[in-house]
Amino acid sequence: MTGEDKLAACDWSRSPLGQPAHWPHTLRLSVEIMLNSPQPMLLMWGRQRVMLCNDAYIELAGPPSLQAPGGTVPSMLPAAWSWNPAALEQVWDGRALAFRAQPLQLWRGGKPASVGLDLYYTPLRNAEGGVDGILCALREAAPLPAAAAAAQAQASLHILVVEDNLDAQYLVCEMLQTFGHQVQAVARAEDALQRLDASRFDILFSDISLPGMSGVELGRLALQRQPGLKIMFASGYGQALLQQLDFPALSLQKPYDIEQLQTALARLAPPAR
């Protein structure tokens, strides 16, 4: 099946890109090349960061819930986009960049692992010379030493996830479970309080914007029920959110990647005994 055939076979009704017949020439040509390529490729289109990828990228990087060619804004950014925001800004400004043997978090055997990658970023220009997107080609480099891989291990935590977007909830729970953590998930703050009354948790990981009670109010009430609970928020405000809180918490800027999630959990995990 050619790249053009693959485009026609996909359901684009839920994608902000719309139907391929209405795409700019640069986007359509780049996606057809990507879908026909045996090399792993990842494409970011527009500043809203719509993501497309090919089957080779899925095989290389996962996660298992992702299916090519994509076509949505991901709730969790791939490491190839998030590991170096300053470099990506240079590509948006029109520079092609290459990086050798960068250690990034990928999926291996159903769990995340640090893998060295060669990364090649190409700006995708429109007819006026502006940059509308970025194409990233990836290639696996030499593996990390065993000692570095072993350093990623974390103690199992009992985590309560509160997220009303079910797709995002599924993805974050899938990742937390592959890290080896015990996870329960609900969509509403009121349901989370019931779980907190019934069970002990190490971490409450909540979205800020929830139907009904907000994540901030949930965090405040959760600490009244379980004073030793660690609070972690996912929000578009990032660390700026923490300045408005009257209780200790950690905030992840949406969208975040696997490595940022692991680092945050490591900061909140109780010290090893």
Image (spheres, grey):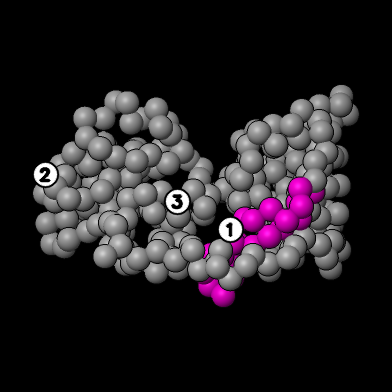
Q: Which residues are magenta?
A: 99-120
Q: Residues within 10 Å of mark 1 (few under 14, many from 20)?
A: many
Residue 250 at x, y percent in the picture: 34, 41
Q: Considering the image in quadrants, where does the N terminus appear?
A: bottom right
* Closer to us: 116 or 179: 116
How far separated are the C-alphas under marks 3 and 1? 12 Å
Q: Residue at x 21, y 30 (%)?
A: 246
Residue 201: x %, y % from top left: 22, 59
Among numbered discs 3 and 1, the one appearing first in the sequence = 1
Q: Who's the residue at 11% across and 44% down the image? A: 224
* First in residue order: circle 1 vs circle 2: 1
Q: Mark 1 falls on what kind of element?
A: strand
Q: Nearer the viewer, residue 225 or 83?
A: 83
**Drawn side of residue 208 relative to residue 96, left or right:** left
Q: CA distance from mark 3 to mark 2?
A: 26 Å
* Pointers 3 and 1 in contact (C-beta within 8 Å): no
Q: Is residue 245 above or below residue 30?
A: above
Q: Mark 2 belongs to which amino acid?
A: Gln
Query: Residue shown at 63%/37% (left/top)?
Result: 85
Tell me which amino acid carries mark 3. Thr
Q: Is residue 227 above or below residue 24?
A: below
Judge by depth and name the residue closer to the eye, 108 or 33: 108
Q: Disc 3 on helix, strand or loop?
A: helix
The residue carrying mark 2 is: 224
Q: Residues within 10 Å of mark 2 (few under 14, many from 20)?
A: few
- Disc 2 secondary structure class: helix
